[in-house]
Image (spheres, rainbow, N blue to C red):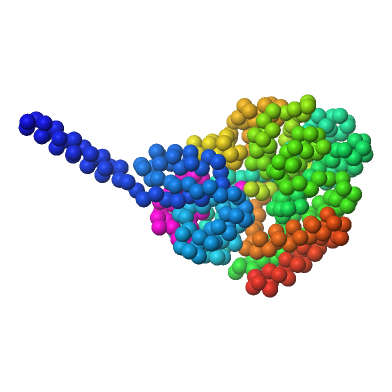
């Protein structure tokens, strides 16, 4: 009997010791749109000694940011949220994000590319950690270019010329290029890859805005006649209509971010009708980050230190980076990350090493300045593009009106810019 009693005591002591070694930590809530979110949360729990992460899925874009602002009003914001770089200044201005700099290691900035660190820095604070980059490139049908004896355009002027040639040769059935009339981020990525710098920050918290600077005008001059004559498609980038047009051969190429190029391969799965999909740099040879995102801790987090540790892991851990790449098509910002292209993706793009292509483009991404009135900028863009499609304005006229309208409305809202 006494032996049984001793065994029972020892077993109880073991349970208590195990509980002390692996305490049950309060979970942190993580909002993200990435499909691999739940798997990443599980991986982190295993690697962090039982720190649970509860995932809530959202779509990227305006839905996430508006949902976060609404949650802030009711005191129900999550601990951590995955945010696109472009919207960080907006949420920082609304006091929705925690400044991470006081709790980060002193060497944290040195671990990331300078352009990525700039994108998460607003004023004197650091309001997120860089996670991924989505440089924009051309996805195109090389078989269609071969059929019409044409090559990939290397300048915007050449793109305009090739677009006319392919439209004429196909009897109007095939259009070379897609213009996204619904997202200003598409336009900003294209023009910034061409050297445009729409905003410059000037301390303390003032800005210069030039949405119609010389590189932007150059792109507009090339695309304006094509829009006027109906020589391009106007689908939302990454949409099913765009994917079907590429599949059916009525569209030859589209400028899209990495994640959209990966999604295209997942949607279409196997090239059909002799289609040969390839990826190339934009006509200027450079690139810009459209859909890149960061990991931010909200100002209402009940566990800011635990939330910050999760963000550090998400941005630095090789396993998390590989899973984000293979499952979601998100390319890590870390210069040391050199992904292999998944076999399915390589097969879709004719053996092309997509990881290597976008790794090189990642190195050409320029540091960008984002502004808290970006939703206003985007709303005006969509309205003006509707006027362009209705033939009420040319693209060049719309560009000038975009600059004037956004400048006026942003100043009226109290922003310090010129």
Residue 386, percent across and down?
79, 57
**21 or 380: nearer the eye?**
380
**111 or 46: nearer the eye?**
46
* Above or below, 80 relative to 261: below
Per the image, is 205 magenta?
no
Residue at x-position 71% and y-position 70%:
409
Q: How many marks?
A: 0
Where is the C terminus found, in terms of image quarters? bottom right
Residue 161 occupies which quadrant of the picture?
top right
Residue 400, percent across and down?
81, 63
* Above or below, 326 relative to 404: above
Residue at x-position 61% and y-position 48%:
292
Residue 33, percent across and down?
56, 47
Residue 374 can be seen, yes or no: yes
Residue 395 can be seen, yes or no: no
Where is the N terminus found, in terms of image quarters? top left
Residue at x-position 88% and y-position 31%:
149
Residue 83, percent across and down?
56, 52
**286 or 236: nearer the eye?**
236
On the rendered structure, is 234 left or right of 72? right
Residue at x-position 69% and y-position 72%:
411
On the rendered structure, is 342 left or right of 313? right
* Above or below, 243 relative to 307: above
The magenta stretch is 292-315
**Which residue sits furthest left?**
2
Per the image, is 313 magenta?
yes
On the rendered structure, is 10 left or right of 53? left
On the rendered structure, is 358 left or right of 317? right
């Amino acid at each position: 009997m006494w032996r049984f009693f001793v065994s029972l005591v020892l077993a109880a002591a073991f349970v208590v010791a195990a509980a002390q070694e692996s305490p049950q930590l309060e979970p942190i809530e993580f909002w993200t749109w990435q499909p691999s979110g739940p798997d990443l949360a599980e991986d982190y729990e295993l690697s962090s000694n039982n720190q649970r992460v509860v995932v809530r899925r959202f779509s990227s874009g305006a839905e996430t940011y508006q949902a976060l602002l609404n949650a802030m009003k009711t005191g129900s914001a999550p601990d951590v949220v995955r945010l696109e770089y472009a919207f960080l200044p907006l949420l920082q201005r609304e006091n929705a994000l925690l400044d991470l700099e006081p709790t980060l290691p002193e060497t944290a900035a040195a671990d990331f590319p300078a352009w990525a660190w700039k994108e998460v820095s607003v004023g004197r604070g650091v309001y997120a950690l860089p996670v991924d980059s989505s440089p924009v490139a051309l996805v195109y049908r090389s078989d269609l270019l071969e059929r019409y004896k044409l090559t990939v355009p290397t300048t915007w002027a050449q793109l305009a010329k090739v677009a006319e040639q392919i439209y004429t040769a196909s009897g109007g059935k095939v259009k070379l290029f897609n213009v996204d009339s619904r997202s200003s981020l598409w336009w900003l990525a294209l023009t910034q890859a061409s050297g445009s710098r729409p905003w410059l920050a000037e301390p303390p918290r003032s800005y210069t805005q030039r949405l119609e600077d010389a590189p932007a005008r150059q792109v507009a001059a090339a695309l304006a006649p094509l829009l006027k004559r109906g020589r391009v498609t106007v689908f939302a980038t990454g949409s099913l209509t765009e994917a079907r047009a590429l599949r059916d051969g009525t569209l030859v190429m589209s400028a899209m971010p990495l994640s959209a190029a990966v999604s295209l391969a997942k949607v279409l799965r196997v090239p059909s009708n002799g289609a040969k999909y390839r990826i190339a740099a934009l006509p200027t040879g450079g690139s810009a980050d459209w859909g890149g995102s960061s990991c931010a801790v909200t100002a209402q987090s009940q566990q800011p230190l635990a939330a910050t540790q999760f963000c550090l892991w998400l941005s630095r851990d090789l396993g998390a980076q590989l899973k984000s790449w293979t499952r979601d098509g998100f390319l890590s910002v870390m210069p040391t990350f050199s992904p292999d292209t998944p076999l399915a993706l390589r097969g879709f793009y004719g053996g092309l090493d997509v990881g290597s292509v976008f790794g090189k483009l990642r190195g050409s991404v320029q540091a960008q300045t984002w502004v808290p009135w970006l939703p206003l900028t985007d709303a005006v863009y969509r309205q003006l593009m509707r006027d362009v499609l209705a033939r009420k304005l040319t693209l060049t006229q719309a560009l000038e009106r975009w600059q004037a309208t956004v400048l006026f409305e942003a100043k009226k809202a109290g922003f310090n810019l010129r």
